Image: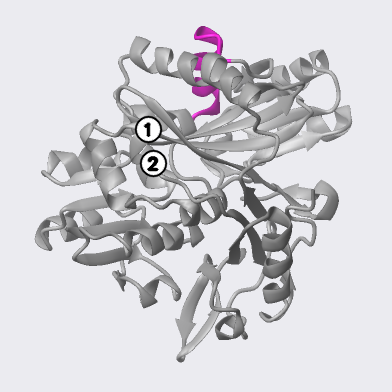
Amino acid sequence: MKVLVVGNGAREHAICYKLKQSKILNKLYCAPGNAGISSIAECVDIKAEDIEKITEFSYNNKIDFVVVGPEVPLVAGIVDELEKNGIKAFGPKRCGAIFEGSKSYSKDFMEKYNVPTAKYKTYTDCTNALEGVKEFSLPVVIKADGLAAGKGVLICNTLNEAQDGIKSILEDKQFGDAGDSLVIEEFLDGTEASLLCFVNGKEIIPMESARDYKRAYDNDLGLNTGGMGCFSPNSIYTDELKAYIKDHVIDTTLKGFLGENIDFRGVLFIGLMIKDNKAKVLEYNTRFGDPETEVVLPRLESDLLEIMVKTTDGTLKQSDLVWSDKKSVTVVLASGGYPESYEKGKEIFGIDDVDSDVIVFHAGTKFSDGKIVTNGGRVLAVTCLADTIEKAREKVYTNVKKICFDKMEYRTDIALL
């Protein structure tokens, strides 16, 4: 098969890494890709959001299958457009991608179908929101309704912080059009867990569990980011908790899909908060999580391309997924200042010095005058598999120290159990 992966981050690098191992793959493209992806796929200079050009390229090059990584083209309807032109694609259509495109839609859906989640209210008017937030206990969570690259969530400890956050979203447009409306949400405490699932239109089939670290700095301090590290499996994910999540989250979500006549095919990411062996849903995403993908996919022993095709065809079964018993840890190396302002174009040293069994997934990188340089906030995701989380963690951090670029930052407490 000729396959095109859409996207340019570490998630797409991890997807390409696994697709490259497929026995049914003949040719792999990535649009636009990055410096790391270019070593395993032919990179095409088309932005992920340019649906017209991606469709045209796929049609002209007789692409058999398109795998869409990022949320923006999914929400914009790229799968609908590709299928309209006879091109098979992995990812939900627009009607499914709205679960990530609108937090208020997702919250209304969860409420309607009794999916456990935090109490919430949605606002478009700033004055009403400033009054409404007083009804919530502190701390309180303020979320931009639309897509904000994983940064549109504010956890506010005081009423003044919350009201300033509301103004920054609705009035100052800190997150652009994503902040035309916002959701004020009850703060949930507990332990976070990430669950990626394949959805074949009729079933929600969980992958292995993971835990993401959202805050920028050690001890969960600093601003929310797209994710600074991850490990899999998540030790909190007991058999009892799995049963609870199946009954109260997976089955109720599936009931909702069927009740709303949504033919969802692709990946559903469920962000969970765990407390007292019960779970509440923090959010739905409608694609592979990042950096969850970098720890989950390396543990997959099945053929990813076959799985994706079966998902799209509606034939995937749980037994099609075979997982390694190895544990995995990923640490993200970021540009100084991320998730706020940061500089690009810093030369990266030491990638070739890491151990042979350590995988370096490129996130924000590009070539400049033959050198690999930084090209984003999150730059690299360093991943290792080992027999235990502790061994994987130790090896990852040993190898992180071999890599450097000016103002490089990373958390030192990923997977510290």
Spot occupied by residue 30 in the image (x, y as percentages of width and height) = 32, 64
Q: Residue at x 38, y 18 (%)?
A: 257
Please give the name of the residue rendered at 54% of the width and 27% of the height, measured from the top-left corner: 103
Is residue 109 in the magenta section? yes
Whether residue 8 can be seen here = no
Numbered range of the magenta stretch = 102-115
Residue visible at 21% across and 35% down in the picture: 313
Q: Residue beneath label 2, please?
A: 321
Q: Nearer the viewer, residue 312 or 208?
A: 208
Q: Quadrant of residue 125?
A: top right
Depth order, front residue of 353/142: 353
Q: Quadrant of residue 259?
A: top left
Task: Provide residue 353's location: percent of width, then percent of height.
Answer: 60, 85
Can you see residue 151?
Answer: yes
SS of the residue under disc 2: loop
Counting from the top left corner in percent of width and height, residue 394 is at 74, 66
Residue 166, magenta (yes or no): no
Q: What element carries label 1?
A: helix
Q: Answer whether labels 1 and 2 touch (C-beta < 8 Å).
A: yes
Q: Is residue 294 above or below residue 252?
A: below
Q: Which residue has dot 1 on it?
A: 318
Tell me if mark 1 has few (under 14), some (14-19) or many (20+) residues whose alpha carbon lies within 10 angstroms of its own.
few
Q: In which quarter of the image is residue 198?
A: top left
Q: Is residue 228 above or below residue 279?
A: below
| Other residues around mark 2 within 10 Å, as few (<14) / some (14–19) / many (≥20) | some
Q: Which secondary structure type mostly characterizes the magenta part of the structure? A: helix
Quadrant the N terminus occupies? bottom left
Residue type for callout 1:
Gln
